[in-house]
Image: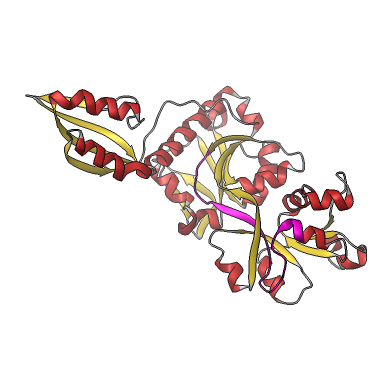
Amino acid sequence: MSKLQQTGIKFALPVGSLNAAERGNTSQLLLDAGYEIEGYKPGKESMKPNFVNDPEIEAFTDRPQNMPVLLASGSYDLAILGSDWVREWELTGVKIAKIADLTYGGVNIVLAVKIESPISGIEQLVESSRSKPVQLATEYLLLTADAVAKTSAWQAAYGATAQPILVTRTLQGRVAAEMMAAGIAIKESFGKTEVGAINGSGIDGIVESTQTGRSLKEAGLKAIGAIFSSTACLYAAPSAIAEPAKLEKIEQVAKLLMGVVRGRSCEYVTFNVPEQQLQQVVSYLVQNGYAAKMPTVSVFGGNAVVATVLPKREYPEAVSKLLNIGADDIVNIRTGQIVTRQQYAEVKR
């Protein structure tokens, strides 16, 4: 049996928006983590990319929509995908293990209606369904149904156990309005859901993912509420988590990827400080969590050279404070990756 068969993992990588530069670029994340990959350039992904410098990873490309059920069945051991599709499949009972939030690819899943519509929120839209049928179009059938059924307007009108009608592809030939005198029908959409809303399809609203809202505006739509927020995350198959060899490999991948995530959020700096003021500077860094554990310090003839990381969010304030308490000649060295010994064995299942 080969080493790959003994300890390797099947790793699913996303195609589409999660491997586009404007949404985080998964291929760049993997490169920054130290992996040399062939066949995974954005827009030019092969079906089986090759992790050149890690033969224990067998890679596949797939649509995020497909990944949760394949992880749950053990067809994949590990995958990068958006938490929106994980939640959609969770509502069917599919369970997979969340390893880490990779923090990129952020989108909001929003309910949108035509700009001229007087409807301004999901509760109002649901309330309107008491007098006339409402049709919604979306790829997220269950996320949408869950959001609708949880509104106070729905529960007051139809009861806590009632559910909107789901119009799947097998029912696409039927008009939702013919199926009910009132209530909400959620129609399955594929791809550009906004286009159907423009072209007189009888749709009252859509539920769609958006990063900037630009495509909604181009379609003459307005968002009236977010029902879910999604980011790219690393997920694993429960069966892989249960195998020590695969779990060890998953931990290794997670540490390298999260090292990049942490590195992108920090600035690595070095600076000089007089030895008599060193303790004050070190105390400031440690108390504010600005050092991984302790800053690196070298002392030469009454002067200390300090190296540490500073969070980008607090960088201007931290630099100003360091200068005020004795630091000088602060040099910023861009951080690519900070790998820690953090364990990811305790995961959400």
The N terminus, quarter of image: top right
Where does the image place residue 348, in percent across and percent down from the top left? 62, 31
Is 214 rendered above or below residue 291? below
- x and y percentages locating residue 72 in the rendered image: 69, 37
235 left or right, relative to 291: right
Foreground residue, 126 or 134?
A: 126
Q: Is residue 109 magenta?
A: yes
* Left or right for 189, reference 333: right
Residue 200 against residue 125 in the figure, above or below: below
* Vertical arrangement, residue 150 with respect to residue 283, above or below: below
* Closer-to-camera residue (125/141): 125
- The residue nearer to you, when weighing 14 against 313, is 313
Residue 80 among magenta residues: no
Q: Is residue 332 visible?
A: yes
What's the magenta region? Answer: 101-124
Residue 323 at what x, y percent from top left?
20, 38
| Quarter occupied by residue 74 | top right
Q: Which residue appears farthest toward the bottom when viewing the image?
A: 199
Left or right placement of residue 307 versus residue 18 in this view: left
Res. 174 in view: no
Residue that lies at the very extreme toward the left in this rendered image: 301
Q: Position of residue 44 (x, y in %)?
A: 50, 59
- The residue lying at 61 percent from left, 67 percent from top is 216
Q: Residue at x 27, y 27 (%)?
A: 295
The C terminus, quarter of image:
top right
Q: How many marks?
A: 0
**What is the basis of the colouring in this image?**
secondary structure
Q: Residue at x 76, y 61 (%)?
A: 125
